[in-house]
Amino acid sequence: MDTIKKEVHQFLVERGWENQYQVPKDLAISLTLEATELLECFQWKSDKEAVAQNRAAMSEELADVFIYATQLATALDLDIETIVQEKLAKNATKYPPKSVK
C-alpha cells in the first residue's frame, strides 16, 4: 500500500496538484463521484451484461475510487492497512460466521 501512496503522491507533485483540492471535503466529494461513475457501468443491465460490456470502464472507475480513497486517507493522516484491519475486526465481532450463515 505504501508504494501506491507514493505513486499517487508523486503523480500529484509532478503536476503541482499536491496542495490543490487535497482537503478532505473535496476528496470525499470526488470519491463519491467516481463511485457513482462505477455504478453507472451497471445501469440498465444485468450484472453479467454489465461486466461483459463495461469491464474496462469498471477497471478505470474502480482505480479512480482507490486513488481518491488513498488521497483521502493521506489527507486525514490515516493508515489504510490499520483502518481496514480495525474495521474487519469490528465486523467480525458484529457478524460472527455462525450467526450469518
Image (cartoon, helix red, strand yellow):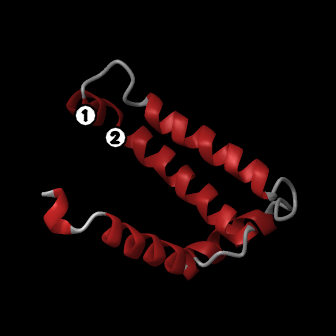
Residue occupying image coordinates x 76% and y 57%: 24
Indicate the position of residue 18 as horizontal and vertical percent values.
82, 65
Residue occupying image coordinates x 68% and y 63%: 71
**Type of the residue with mark 2:** Arg
Residue occupying image coordinates x 61% and y 42%: 32
Indicate the position of residue 35 as horizontal and vertical percent values.
53, 42
Q: CA distance from mark 1 to mark 2?
A: 6 Å
Task: Report whether 26 appears left or right of 19.
Answer: left
Task: Report whether 97 appears left or right of 10.
Answer: left
| Rendered image: mark on residue 52 | 1
| Rendered image: mark on residue 55 | 2
Residue nearer the viewer, 90 or 55: 90
Q: Looking at the picture, does residue 16 appear above or below residue 78?
A: above
Instruction: For the C terminus, give its image quadrant.
Output: bottom left
User: Which quadrant of the figure has residue 20?
Assistant: bottom right
Indicate the position of residue 2 as horizontal and vertical percent values.
57, 81
**Type of the residue with mark 1:** Ala
Q: Are marks 1 and 2 in contact (CB under 8 Å)?
A: yes
